[in-house]
Amino acid sequence: MDDESNGWQLTESDPGVFTELLKTLGVKLVVDDLYSLDTETLSTLQPIHALIFLFKWVSNQDERGGGSGTYDDAFPGFFAHQVVNNACATLAVLNALLNIPALKTGPELQDLLSFTTGMDAQTRGLAITSSGFLREAHNALSPPSAISLDGLHVPKTSEEAYHFVVYLPVAGSVYELDGLKRSPVRHGAHSDGGEGWTSKAREIIEARIATYPPGSLAFNLMAIHDDSLPHLQAHLRAAQSAGDDFVTAELASMISQENDKRMRWAFENSLRRHNHVGLVHALTLALAKAGLLGSVTDQAKTKLKERIEKIRKDGKMEEH
Amino acid sequence: MTSEPLLAFKAGRSQRREGTNFVDAMQTKGIISLHKEDDLLHFKWTNRLTGETEEDLILFPQDASFSKVSQAPGGRTYILKFMSSNQKHFSLPKVLASGLYWHTLSSLSNERLTDSKDKFTARDEEFARNVNVLLENPEGSLTWNIASGSSTNSQVPASEQAAASSVTSSLPQLNADQLARLRELVATMASEPAPVQPTVSLSDVLTVETLSPLFTNHPDLISALFPHLPPDLPMPPSEEVLQRVIASPQFQTAVGNFDQALHTGLLGGLVRGLGLPEEAGTGVEPFLRAVQDQARREGGGSNDSGASSRDEMETD
């Protein structure tokens, strides 16, 4: 309806939203929040293919991602520039996915990859932005708007300047792909033994976080990783046939937790897609039929009045 | 650095066809916004497609006025008119020096041009009136009629406003005939009372707390709500699911958005789809009143207490 941001709507940065996006793109991977970067937390999600670092963008002071990296203008993989603001989440996901070796994707993503071969990062960004399929996949979980209000909140304040950066291994090195930077940033080789590339990525991300003054950075980390359910289910069957009750119970509990999470994602995603105006009206009507709307409205008026008075009072106090 | 706008509303540019008195609405969607930056009032127009601010005028108090060009088809064309003596203050190209044209049409199809005339005029004029408040004095306080208390002082029909207005302004590029039909906005709006802020927010009406008596005391009304739940929920509808939905940030955001949308006063068409009169789309209070009436028509709400019982007695 509205053509602001070329039709790309603002989406929530939520693992359930990202996982649904991957599903639409025909990719059988899962995205989860990371509350810690320690080895144990990461080990429950391995194999991890990429880390998404989401942060409030302060300025471009941090040119090379913590100072340890160098621009790689001859990057061998896929890299696209961010050309539309609201598309940044999907762009970050694509920069990650299209560099995962031997990844199975839907036909649309394969087409995009072959179509953009040989293009520069800027043109690739434009190709992504003008893809109707990608835009629809991205917008699928934005609430349908009864009326366009976007334009009335001008201008976008810096509060909304969140930015997505992807870290992943390409050809033996850990790379940082940031659609607002000239080229991918190479942070050096990682070892294949032990924990693998995520150990190097942890160093880089921790160093980066340390460059911001304490408290000045709001950030969130997510991991793109293999779906653990098939794996857990196979282990469960093995434990059951081996008669290992302890492991069986533990695996069953992990599977049930995982299923609960998927259920919650499905619930939240269906709420994201839904137009709630009918429910808003039906609830108001039910309140009226129950004889409650009058008193509820009066209470609501008092609440708003109190809020306005509080704002006025606080405003006055600041003047002193 | 751009400051928070003092006022912003959707508007496109219009252009006077050279050598004629026709004013054409241009397709590009945009926003007019007024800002105070470094103690100066800026009048900006931002292209909503590119996000670029294509017009940024610094206006000193009483430099300009914003008024309706009422002979334009659809009646939603406005001119930002500059007082000639103040031209030296800002570096406008000569061609633009007399005025800039704008329109507030949301669509440029012919149907909408004629159709939308009355529906949106009141809202437009409210924005225009507030633009003039700021052009007169950047510190001036804005007032809005939209969520005003009683239905009696709801918007004056456009025809009445037109009849009440008189010619109080002049435009150098228009002939005398057209001048005679030009209506000055400020004059018409000045006669209207200026009520304050919205008095109620829908987000306070539909909360987990306000709705809980509905669940405990009126289970009969609950199942009627199920069809309005998302069709693809991963579980069958139930009272518990409904309560989870109401408590969810997604639903609360939707309520907030609808509340804001009602403040724009542009939801006439949408609320008709809910079986409500168009007036219900002009603000939160009109919406609540209309739903109250609807409940009464469908048989209910007879034992209501509080402010709206007064309304009931009127209709009895």
Image (cartoon, coloured by chain):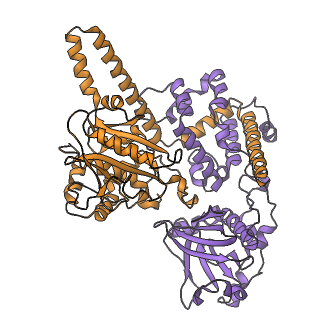
Chain colours: A orange, B purple
- For the residue pair A216 and B140, the one nearer the viewer reads as A216
**Callout count:** 0
Res B235 visible = yes
Q: Relative to B146, does residue A301 appear above or below in the rendering?
A: above
- For the residue pair A74 and A234, the one nearer the viewer reads as A74
* Image location of residue A303, percent across then percent down: 74, 39
Q: Quadrant of residue A290?
A: top right
* Image location of residue B180, percent across then percent down: 73, 84
Q: Relative to A185, does residue A102 appear above or below in the rendering?
A: above
Q: Relative to B33, does residue B79 appear above or below in the rendering?
A: below
Res A89 visible = no
* Image location of residue A243, percent across then percent down: 22, 7
Name of the residue lying farthest toward the left: A102
- For the residue pair B249 and A162, the one nearer the viewer reads as A162
* Residue B235 located left or right of residue A93: right
Rendered residue at 65%/42% (across/down): B202
Rendered residue at 49%/55% (across/down): A58
* Residue B262 located left or right of residue A320: left
Q: Relative to B197, does residue A288 appear above or below in the rendering?
A: above
Q: Quadrant of residue A201?
A: top left
Q: Quadrant of residue A124?
A: bottom left
Rendered residue at 77%/66% (across/down): B140
- For the residue pair B160 and A249, the one nearer the viewer reads as A249
* Image location of residue A76, percent across then percent down: 20, 56
